[in-house]
Image: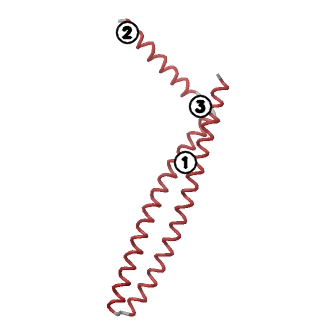
Amino acid sequence: MMRNMVSAVLAGMLLCGAAARADDQDPADQKVAADKAKLQSDRATVKADKAKDKADRQSVRADRKQLAADKAAGNADAVAADKSKLKADKTQLRADEKQTREDRREKRQDRRELRQDRREDRREDRQGK
């Protein structure tokens, strides 16, 4: 009986603390939430970029294989076409890898901003008490 009352009181205190924190939606809390959402978006973008880079590398690999086969067969027209396709695919790969690097850089910057905003939020919460 006593244990139930104590656990009920503790549960109530926990819920009151969570409710008080949920009601406290100051600008710093909103900024942290926005940064979290942006970071999630950046993670998805980087993941998609990695998949695209992998597909580009496979395409370049297949182009090289086809070029070698056409060279071995002695087909000059196919070799020329393969070389141009390989050049275009390499250009695309470089562009995609550059975009991936930029997205990773942006993700890193957003993580720093989130960390800084969380610090500011905690600082405000401590000063407000």
Query: Residue at horizontal 38%, vertical 84%?
Result: 67
Left or right: 22, with 79 as reference point: right
Type of amino acid under label 2: Arg
The part of the image, by quadrant, that contains residue 82 is bottom left
Mark earlier in primary sequence (2, 3): 2
Quadrant position of the N terminus in the picture: top left
- Look at the numbered disc 1 and give the secondary structure of its residue: helix
- Look at the numbered disc 3 and give the secondary structure of its residue: loop
Mark earlier in primary sequence (1, 3): 3
Which residue occupies the foreground of this view, 29 or 126? 126
Image position, residue 123 (x, y; %): 65, 31
Image position, residue 3 (x, y; %): 37, 9
* Residue ID for mark 2: 3
State the residue lying farthest toward the top.
2
* Residue ID for mark 1: 38
Which residue occupies the foreground of this view, 72 or 108? 72
